Amino acid sequence: MRDEVREYYGQTLQQSSDLQTSACCDTAPPEHLKPLLGKLHEEVVNRYYGCGLVAPDLLEGMRILDLGCGSGRDVYLLSALVGGQGEVLGVDMTPEQLAVAERHIDYHREAFGYRHSNVRFREGFIEQLDALGLPDDYFDIVVSNCVINLSPDKARVLREVHRVLKPGGEMYFSDVYADRRIPEDLTQDPVLYGECLSGALYWNDFLHLARGAGFVDPRLVEDRPLAINNPQIAEKLDPVRFWSATYRLFKLKGLEPACEDYGQAVVYRGTIPGAPRKFRLDSHHVMDAGRVFPVCGNTWRMLSDTRFAPHFDFIGDFSTHYGIFPGCGQNVPFGEEAASRDGGSCC
């Protein structure tokens, strides 16, 4: 299937309008990113096939790896956010896509006012980062936008990401997920696979793979249901339902398999650029500036042992365990019920 995917994205698709479904289509970007997106070269934007926005907070000076960078849209957006002291590396297996990205390096260097470009591109497979010589514990952040579903070895992708991330680093990525395992015959359909559908993981299988790779507590940031607007494709896939979802996975020691309560809390200082009133860690944790916010031990570590620590005050410690937070269970993480929990404490 790898050769079929390379052909689909390198030759069959020439621009985003060539897609047969809306699975690999972005939502409207936040206002503060629109000016930067407006500076990107038209050809780079037209060859973009993402399903989310992979631009978390606090990127100044970060080393970022983009898996499946394609024509480089996210690489160039992130290059503006990391600044002249940061760097962004894009990896992709499709030569035609990389050619688009590479011929606009100088254009974007000038557009963002850099003396030297802070981006690089490498041809390779996202499940074989070791073959590219990428070192252990090097990147602050790894991103990916609607690409891991295309990999034939998703478990190896996650293991490689864990290897190249620094301690305290995170993988922040968007992808397509299904509410059940895709039937085997559909996974062999090159169009369904290329449209980011039949290679999508069942959400619970993804959580299992992530934990197996060392990301003990995956955090869902946001999700939206995907409508299959091609009647023929929709009929083939029925009754499987799909979501586009963004997760963040932290490389941290000491995380526990569930939300354990140690009587801790945090107070967001309101000092993260672009987030003066509230900070959104994930879909369960939206923290108002200045307000005491109870957290589990894992959430505490995601804030205290990462780049977010200077922006929070921390209350409590790990000396007393009060049990698990009520409601911390294994439910489908997507949809209105999950969204209704925004703004509460753990689970």
Image: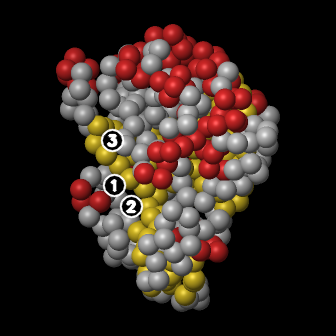
Q: Name the element at disc 3.
A: strand
Q: Name the element at disc 2.
A: loop
**Badges 1 and 2: C-beta atoms under 8 Å apart?**
yes
Say which residue appears at 64% left-offset and 37% top-offset: 111
Residue 13: % across, % down:
45, 15
Residue 84 got which mark? none
Q: Quadrant of residue 269?
A: bottom right
Residue 243 got which mark? 3
What residue is pinned by disc 2?
A: 283
Residue 188 makes an appearance in the image = no
Q: Is residue 30 above or below residue 299?
A: above
Mark positioned earlier in the residue sequence (2 or 3):
3
Say which residue appears at 64% left-offset and 74% top-offset: 310
Residue 223: % across, % down:
35, 49
Query: 10 Å neighbourhood of mark 3: few (<14), some, or many (≥20)?
Result: many
Residue 246 makes an appearance in the image = yes
Say which residue appears at 51% left-offset and 32% top-offset: 147
Residue 28: % across, % down:
37, 43
Residue 333 got which mark? 1
Of the residues tagged 1 and 3, which is closer to the observer? 3
Of the residues tagged 1 and 2, which is closer to the observer? 2
Q: Quadrant of residue 313?
A: bottom right
In this view of the protein, which residue sits in the foreground, 160 or 173?
A: 173
